[in-house]
Amino acid sequence: MLAGLHHFQVAVPKDAEDISRGYYVGVLGMTELPKPPVLAARGGCWFAAGDLEIHTGVEEPFVPARKAHPGIIVTDIDKVAAALTKAGHDYTWDDAIPDRRRMHTFDPHGNRLEFIQQ
């Protein structure tokens, strides 16, 4: 019945589009997707990498997701770590699950993200 994940959305504060672009495009190498005009009027951005889409949506009052998080499969977790380091973003390796290489970080809005080696 379920077929996969199309996208996930993270909350962002109002007028945070440029900060989101700097992180999701500039650091993670995603491509920005155009939003339909009726949705673009609400603020936020859409980004894609392969079959994955991340949508940012304005939420007021804004509260970042500090615990809840998406688990994003990556082809080269060391490359992600290097990109985060180069851009000055902290991350934490997590070895709590045997045989699974993964790390946690926070986007510039404070939302938790998990990267998992494919």
Image (cartoon, grey):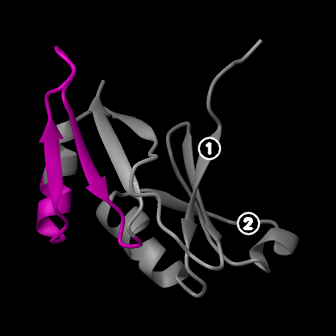
Q: Residue at x 77, y 11 (%)?
A: 1
Magenta residue span:
82-109
Quadrant location, the C terminus = top left
- 62 or 21: which is nearer to us? 62
- 73 or 102: which is nearer to us? 102
User: Is residue 109 visible to the viewer in this orientation of the structure?
Assistant: yes
In percent of width and height, residue 46 lies at 61, 61
Q: Which of the labelled discs sits on residue 7, or is there none? A: 1
Task: Say which quarter of the image contains residue 71.
Answer: top left
Where 52 falls versus 4 (above or below)? below
Q: Which of the labelled discs sits on residue 81, or is there none? A: none
Q: Indicate the secondary structure of the residue bearing disc 1.
A: strand
Disc 2 to disc 1, C-alpha distance: 14 Å
In percent of width and height, residue 85 lies at 12, 62
Q: Which residue is mark 2?
A: 35
Q: Indicate the secondary structure of the residue bearing disc 2.
A: loop
